[in-house]
Image (spheres, helix red, strand yellow):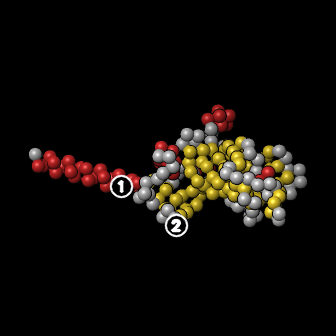
Amino acid sequence: MNKIINKINILALLLSAACSIAQTSMSVEEYGRYKMENNGKLPPTLREINDVNNFFNPYLGSWIASYNNRDYQLNVYKERNYNEVFDLSEDRLRFSYTIKNSATGAVLADSSNERLGEAIGIKYQPLSGHYELHMTTGCGESKTILLGFTTSEILLNGSIYDQMVFAAFDSWYNRPATSGRCQSYSHLIPDVAIRFERM
């Protein structure tokens, strides 16, 4: 009987250790699902979010689109980030961009402008299958960006990775286009879904 109890205790310790180890590291997909199922909360022992399954690979590279007489180019890449506040290292997506006048080729805006910083990845959204990023557009404005692939793209193109949906929408707060010395460029990033093609 003691042998059985000892085996049960050992099994319980192993399971506990396995759970503890699993909570120190998560894949990008697990992170998205866990946040969704736990109202945005994360395990207190979580220290790493890793792209272990190459989940980001389809997003990476250069993408182009034309919309409303403007040409858009996105350069999506992966980075490793350390958050001191949460003591958390994570793989995440970022993108830089350039927006040009379609007729003249003149650059209207690009992410090298200090008021138009690159978008920083926040989380994968399992329900929609999109990856969410946050972009501050200057003058106290911000936008939420969704990047993703949909079933309709498979039907239209034969490959889910040939076209990507870019959807932007205002979030949190907005201010007028001009506020004192601050010139807003947020109108150049429309609050609609745009279909980008891989370059």
| C-alpha distance separating marks 2 and 1 | 21 Å
- Residue at 82% in and 65% down: 181
Say whether residue 51 is left or right of residue 98: left
Q: Do the CB atoms of the residues marked 2 and 1 lie less than 8 Å apart? A: no
* Residue type for callout 2: Glu
> Whole-percent x and y of residue 82?
53, 64
The residue closer to the viewer here, 69 or 190, is 190
- Residue at 70% in and 46% down: 169
The residue closer to the viewer here, 158 or 134, is 134
How packed is label 2: few (under 14 Cα within 10 Å), some, or many (20 or more)? few
| Mark positioned earlier in the residue sequence (2 or 1) | 1
Say whether residue 169 is left or right of residue 44: right
> Whole-percent x and y of residue 130?
60, 44
Q: Which image quadrant: the N terminus?
A: top left
Q: Which residue is mark 1?
A: 20
Q: Secondary structure at mark 1?
A: helix
Query: Could you tell me if residue 172 is visible in this image?
Result: yes
Q: Which residue is mark 2?
A: 84
Q: Which mark, by number, is residue 194?
A: none
